Every structure is written in structure tokens, then in C-alpha cells.
Amino acid sequence: MNALLELYNDKPVVILAFPCDQFNLQQPEADDEILNGIKYVRPGHGFVPNNRIHYFAKSNVNGADETSLYKNLKSSCPATTNMLGVRTEFYWDQIRSNDITWNWNKFLLDKTGVPRHRFGSDSDVTQLTSWIDNVMNEK
């Protein structure tokens, strides 16, 4: 995400990060330990996230305890895959067709907060830029 923000250094692009531990328990630390985990563990080596990445408390993105934010985002954008159920490391009680299937799903919102597009976990910066450019250039 740092690389993405560098591409938009002079633009009003920000990233809101919501850690989640529902995928193979990959986010086990407490909320106040997340930034240290990024800096020293994964990716580690003193990595410092861009100051336009805003980290929030861990939240559930699927299942009975999913936050209303993710309920809204998922209902606004189609699922990124039809392969739901292939993994066995899910840690929530329901599996629905629009559930998030792994860490690093991304949602692009316009400047008014309307969800515009959803990207899967395997998407990279090159797949996001044309969508971001289109949203930023709309009148």
C-alpha cells in the first residue's frame, strides 16, 4: 500500500486498514500491537507504513459478528471470486457468496464515501490505479 500512496503522492488518496483475524488467525496480536507487528514481523525489517494509511481496531468482516461497515461494503460491490469454500482456514460461522475470502481484500470508495469497486486479495497496485484514476476524474 505504500507503493500505491507514492503513486498518488500529490492526490487526496488515503487508505483505511481494518485488521481481521478470521483468516487462519493471521492477525493474532492486540490492536495496540498491530503497527509493531508490521514494523518488526511482517513485512518486518523496520518497515514503516505511509502516514496516509490509517489503522483501525481489529474487526470481523464476515459472519454473525461482522461490522456494519463490512456488511455495507460487501452488499455494495460484487464478490471477487466464486471459489468460496475452497480454503479450510475460515474462522466465522457463516459462508455467504459475498463474504471476504482472505486477507487484503480492498474496496475503493469515492470522495463521498460511496463504495465503487472491490478487489480480491491477490490484486496489486497495477490493478488498482486505473480504477482510482477513473473515480478521481469523475465530476
Image (spheres, grey):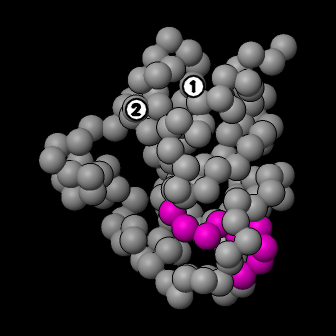
Closest to the observer, 129 or 61: 129
Closer to viewer: mark 2 or mark 1: 2
Residue at left offset 15%, top offset 47%: 45
Above/below status of 14 relative to 98: above
Q: Earlier in the sequence, mark 2 or mark 1?
A: 2
Q: Which of the image's four quarters has the C terminus?
A: top right
Closest to the observer, 30 or 120: 120
Q: Which residue is mark 1?
A: 13
C-alpha gap between disc 2 and disc 1 = 12 Å
Q: Is residue 111 left or right of residue 47?
A: right
Corner quadrant of residue 53: top left
Name the element at disc 2: helix
Residue at left offset 78%, top offset 28%: 112
Specify whether residue 57 is in view: yes
Q: Mark 2 belongs to which amino acid?
A: Ala
Specify whether residue 72 is in view: no
Other-residue count near label 1 (Cα within 10 Å), few / some / many at <14 / 14–19 / ≥20? some
Other-residue count near label 2 (Cα within 10 Å), few / some / many at <14 / 14–19 / ≥20? few
The span shown in magenta is 95-103
* Residue 61 among magenta residues: no
Q: Is residue 12 left or right of residue 44?
A: right
Q: Is residue 13 left or right of residue 19?
A: right
Q: Main secondary structure of the magenta part?
A: loop
Residue at left offset 60%, top offset 37%: 128
Residue 22 at what x, y percent from top left? Answer: 53, 75
Q: Which residue is mark 2?
A: 3
Q: Is residue 68 left or right of residue 104?
A: right
Q: Mark 1 belongs to which amino acid?
A: Val
- Whether label 2 touches label 1, CB < 8 Å: no
Residue at left offset 54%, top offset 58%: 121
